[in-house]
């Protein structure tokens, strides 16, 4: 799907910051796309951008109203419908990451049809995908993989995109989750794709490209997670990754939502190489990204130094300490593919 920018961010009346984490992610990485926020009375989240009415948002150039929230069950509250209809009537498309389809709400569907506006349900792709073919294609691809879910895979590739572009390199973030689709304006929520077509969807997200172009593919789940390993493997095979970065959260002992122990970084590297060679025999690790938010700075730096020495790879917290070392390693590993 292709979502028109800029955005007016709709937060409804969510009770806290966590409920608006999708919106916060968009503002963190694409502030230039966010003209303002629209909040209902009682909203406890604040993105730190101007509060606007629908008319003011349209006046500032907004083209899409983003329902940037998450909630239990992914439902669309009934008392939000009138505001969404008003946005459509004012000329805005609407995009949502909730499980409830916008078009399943009669008032919204009728307004969109009447005014010729687009409804984007990011968790429900209408795109048809082929099964993955595993045939090598031009271009270079990096995939983030994890020791667990929610360890920084999306933020790592976004930081890499920013860092690589700052050095004049040709690199694009490729989204595989709903927040990532909003951030990029394009992509597929892989968890909404039928299992047989996951690798094909990734081939569609990151198609043949110029030999020097890097697609930076947002990873999902973990090869070791009993709930999501199938998604992670489909991503790996479809990406045909030339390089991968292992993402890790150091304070966990078990994986999220299950009682299985967290795998080691070495186990993730070894299994990713073993399985990734099916579609790219030359796959290799090029770095480690650690979410050190729970650690003090000295403790975080000591951990990163130890991991770098242990694995012979650059290790960093991409948000806290930047990605220069990760980019340096890519340039060193793939010198022919980078401009002099």
Image (cartoon, rainbow, N blue to C red):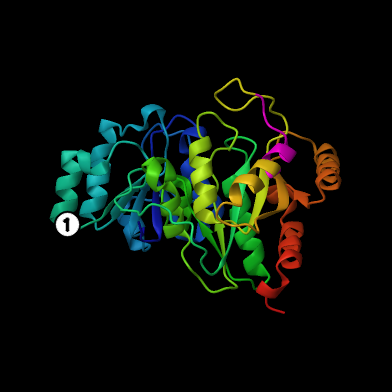
Q: Judge by depth and name the residue closer to the eye, 179 or 241.
A: 241
Q: Position of residue 189 (x, y in %)?
A: 42, 46
For the point 70% across and 43% down, which residue is it? Answer: 270
Quadrant in which the C terminus is drawn: bottom right
SS class, disc 1? helix
For the point 69% across and 55% down, which residue is it? Answer: 284
Q: Position of residue 137 (x, y in %)?
A: 51, 66
Mark 1: few, some, or many residues within 10 Å (few <14, many ≥20)?
some
Q: Position of residue 195 (x, y in %)?
A: 40, 41
Looking at this rendering, what residue extends furthest in the top direction?
Answer: 259
Query: As drawn, is 76 to the left or to the right of 339?
Result: left
The magenta stretch spans residue 208: no
Query: As drawn, is 97 to the left or to the right of 248?
Result: left
User: Which span of residues is magenta-colored?
Assistant: 261-269
Displayed quadrant of residue 79: top left
- Residue 71 to residue 199: above or below: above
The answer, for residue 210, to whether it is visible in the render is yes
- Residue assigned mark 1: 115
Looking at this rendering, what residue extends furthest in the bottom direction?
Answer: 340
Q: Judge by depth and name the residue closer to the eye, 170 or 165.
A: 170
Displayed quadrant of residue 338: bottom right
How many numbered marks does the figure carry? 1
For the point 50% across and 70% down, which residue is it? Answer: 209
Query: As drawn, is 340 to the left or to the right of 209?
Result: right
Q: Judge by depth and name the residue closer to the eye, 277 or 80.
A: 277
- Residue 235 to residue 338: above or below: above
């Amino acid at each position: 799907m292709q979502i028109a920018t800029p955005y007016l961010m709709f937060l409804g009346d969510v009770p806290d910051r966590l409920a608006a984490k999708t919106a916060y992610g968009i503002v963190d990485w694409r502030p230039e796309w966010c003209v303002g926020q629209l909040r209902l009375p009682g909203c406890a989240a604040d993105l730190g951008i101007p509060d606007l009415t629908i008319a003011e948002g349209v006046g500032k150039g907004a083209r899409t109203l983003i329902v940037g929230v998450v909630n239990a069950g992914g439902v669309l509250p009934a008392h939000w419908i009138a505001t969404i209809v008003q946005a459509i009537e004012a000329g805005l498309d609407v995009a949502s990451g909730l499980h409830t389809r916008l078009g399943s709400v009669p008032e919204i569907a009728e307004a969109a049809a009447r005014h010729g506006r687009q409804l984007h349900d990011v968790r429900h792709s209408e795109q048809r995908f082929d099964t993955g073919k595993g045939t090598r294609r031009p271009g270079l691809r990096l995939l983030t993989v994890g020791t667990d879910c929610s360890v920084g895979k999306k933020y790592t590739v976004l930081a890499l995109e920013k860092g690589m572009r700052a050095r004049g390199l040709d690199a694009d973030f490729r989204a595989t989750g709903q927040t990532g689709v909003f951030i990029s304006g394009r992509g597929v929520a892989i968890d909404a794709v039928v299992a047989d077509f996951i690798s094909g969807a990734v081939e569609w997200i990151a198609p043949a490209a110029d030999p020097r172009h890097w697609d930076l593919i947002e990873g999902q789940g973990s090869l070791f997670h009993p709930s999501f390993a199938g998604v992670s493997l489909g991503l790996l095979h479809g990406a045909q990754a030339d390089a991968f970065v292992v993402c890790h959260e150091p304070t966990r002992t078990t994986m999220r939502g299950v009682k299985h122990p967290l795998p080691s970084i070495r186990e993730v590297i070894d299994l990713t190489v073993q399985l990734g060679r099916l579609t790219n025999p030359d796959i290799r690790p090029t770095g480690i990204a650690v979410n050190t938010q729970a650690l003090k700075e000295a403790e975080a730096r000591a951990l990163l130094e130890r991991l770098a020495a242990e694995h012979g790879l650059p290790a960093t917290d991409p948000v806290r300490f930047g990605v220069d070392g990760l980019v340096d390693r890519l340039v060193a590993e793939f010198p022919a593919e980078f401009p002099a």
